[in-house]
Image: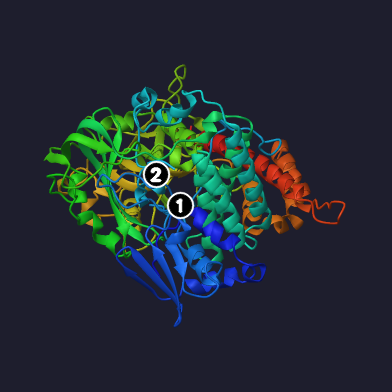
Amino acid sequence: MSLPPVDPAVTAEAVAALPARLKSRVDAAVDQARTWPCHTDGTTVTVHPDDKTTVTLTVPVVSAGDATCSCLLAPRCLHRAAVLSAAPILTEVGSHSGGGPPEVASSLSGAPVRAGSGDGRDAGSPASTGTPESGPGAADGEPATVGETARPLECHSEGSARSGAPGSAEAKRGSVAAAGVPVSAAQRGAAAGLWAVAADVLAGGVPGGGAVAQAALLRAVHSARAAGLHTAAAAAVRVVEHLRAARRDDPAFQRGDLADDLRELLLTCHRLGRGEASAVGVARRGYQPVGDLRLFGLFCEPVRAATGHAGAVTYLADPRGRTWVVSDVKPAEPSVALTATRGSVDLGEVRLSHRDLSRAGLRAINAHASPAGRLSHGRARQAVTAPGTGWFDEPLDALWRVSLAAQVDRWLTAAAQPVHERPAAHDLAFLEGVILGADRRGLLLAVQLPAPPDAQPTRDADAESSRVVDAPSSREGDAQPGRGVDAGAGHDGDGGVGASAGGREITVVVGVPHEDPALPYVGNLRLLAEHAVGRSVRVAGRFSGACRVEGLAVAAEWLPDRYGGHVDLGAQRLTRADVPGSTGGERPVVADRAGPPLHLVRHQLERVAAAGRAALLSGAEQDAARLAVAHLATAAAVVGALAEAGVRRTRDVFGRLDPQDSRHLAQAWLAAAVYEQAASAEATRSAWT
């Protein structure tokens, strides 16, 4: 069943107009609507609930008249409301400069589209957040594709990140803050309404998040859009999509994603209630001229999402260190990802595949790109092929000279921003280190950190004398990520093991975005772990946690020339003959101590987001006690307050449940969520640096 996107106000009005006796049946009707036969003829989509009834949708569905039903109860009928509730949500439509279709919230499947397969969480930063104390007092858009919605695709060097170039966080957020326009009364009112509905959704969880609750949230989204609250409206739409995915048992649903978007929604409404103009956000913008570009291929990756999208993405860098992307991702079968990188790039006169472009370069005249750095493509664009360069030559070599601390800070700072305002490719990691081997989590890479300015090059006698230092949470023979390897061990110029001149090393776990054996990720990392121990490599990947990355491409001076300088781990398959073999013996690994048990806070947050108030009937007080034993007083306090708010049930003078109980629960939950985001970010930063 392929339905057109529907404006949130149309769905909200259709459900609200139903008689009470039909509202109780709408959830079951939505499940049935997904199986009804559907026929598309031009701009008209016809759905047949039965032999005598027809629901007709005019694409796009932006008004009540665009959705009609032939039954006698129309327009207050169950057929029409069910079809509209099953259809994807129409978000702000952007300009199309050869960039893709109108933007639909996430995807037709309802789950956020992700190029990788991580846990869906982004560690946040304490910047621009605060612990809430109380509730809060449509434009041109950039077409959304898989490559951008899930994994932003732009990266800045330290220099360009400070320059406020188009697409940077400063440029986007500054457009509102620089104007100095205060939050209006209408915006405060819309934020208050959105907060109230979101609090009810949180209290009910997925079981209570049926079509009626979704319609109430979509109605608040319509009001928020009318008031120009871009960030809050976008977050609310994602919450609705998560609820839909969860209720239809979509395997792509992750309750961590639902918790993250609920936190963003509630926090944005809270900040608007306090009058913070920066919380209004910015609308998605279309492709804009960026001048002439000289770009060098960096790497490419196949994209295969659980939402039914597949394709390939190629990353390129300019001489200033800014990363751009050419994306070819569309609704397709998962098998398309296996060959997508060999497909031709549709950009001007460029006649290269994605794989070849990632090793070559291009010149673009009067190029157009999104603020996130995604190039507009098509034959109308003026672009030609140009020579490329390797990772060890300028300008690409500069990406690996950016300090690891600066890369981690860029990732965490951007991850704390609203999803659609994050700089593209904020989570790309450029690492250089020595292969140590592998464990059950992935390839182990020893990465050398720079020594402090006043440090003297010394060797740690204790580290030299021990093979493995056990940590309380480590298992025998299974190293934990963190400050990982013998501080006195390094690598020499031949790619072998040698002495370090100073600083310390951390052990980074390199995992895979996709574990499907049809893609060569797992086989390539396994081959490197078995036959390249002690060899020096450069890795391009994505940050996925504390001392964890998802490997996307590798390069080494010992790679055969036929690979063109680097190997795309998801598109090319290494062979044993390509790897020269390990050097020296097994490297000693020092396991890091376990980090703070913040997962207990996260667990309670996700439980409430998924199950609602009922999740706090047991378990929360025990976790608060465990956090207190771990000397995390603030964590214990916020979890304890959450548990208390969960069991609070008061009634008014008429014996009805007080709606303020949901507000108190939302306040307690948001306080715990903001704390967990900031604390997790600092713990992650500490593990990396």
Residue type at tag 2: Arg
C-beta proximity under 8 Å, tags 2 and 1:
yes
Q: Residue 276, how many percent across, how many down?
A: 58, 29
Disc nearer the start of the sequence (2/1): 1
Report which residue position mark 1 lands on: 118
User: Can residue 618 be seen in the rendering of this structure?
Assistant: no
Report which residue position mark 2 lands on: 542
**Mark 2 Cα within 10 Å, few/some/many (few <14, many 20+)?**
many
Q: In this view, does 388 lie to the left or right of 112?
A: left
Image quadrant containing the N terminus: bottom left
Quadrant hosting residue 63: bottom left
Q: Nearer the viewer, residue 307 or 557?
A: 307
Q: Residue 285, how many percent across, how many down?
A: 37, 38
Q: What element carries label 1?
A: loop
Question: Which residue extends farthest right?
Answer: 653
Q: Considering only vertical position in the picture, is 292 above or below 440?
A: above
Residue type at tag 1: Gly
Q: In this view, does 40 lie to the left or right of 364?
A: right
Q: Considering only vertical position in the picture, is 89 above or below 186?
A: below
Quadrant hosting residue 634: top right
How much space separates mark 2 and mark 1, taking CA atoms?
A: 10 Å
**Mark 1 Cα within 10 Å, few/some/many (few <14, many 20+)?**
some
Q: Residue 171, how many percent across, how many down?
A: 40, 28
Q: Nearer the viewer, residue 556 or 9?
A: 9
User: Can residue 17 be seen in the rendering of this structure?
Assistant: yes
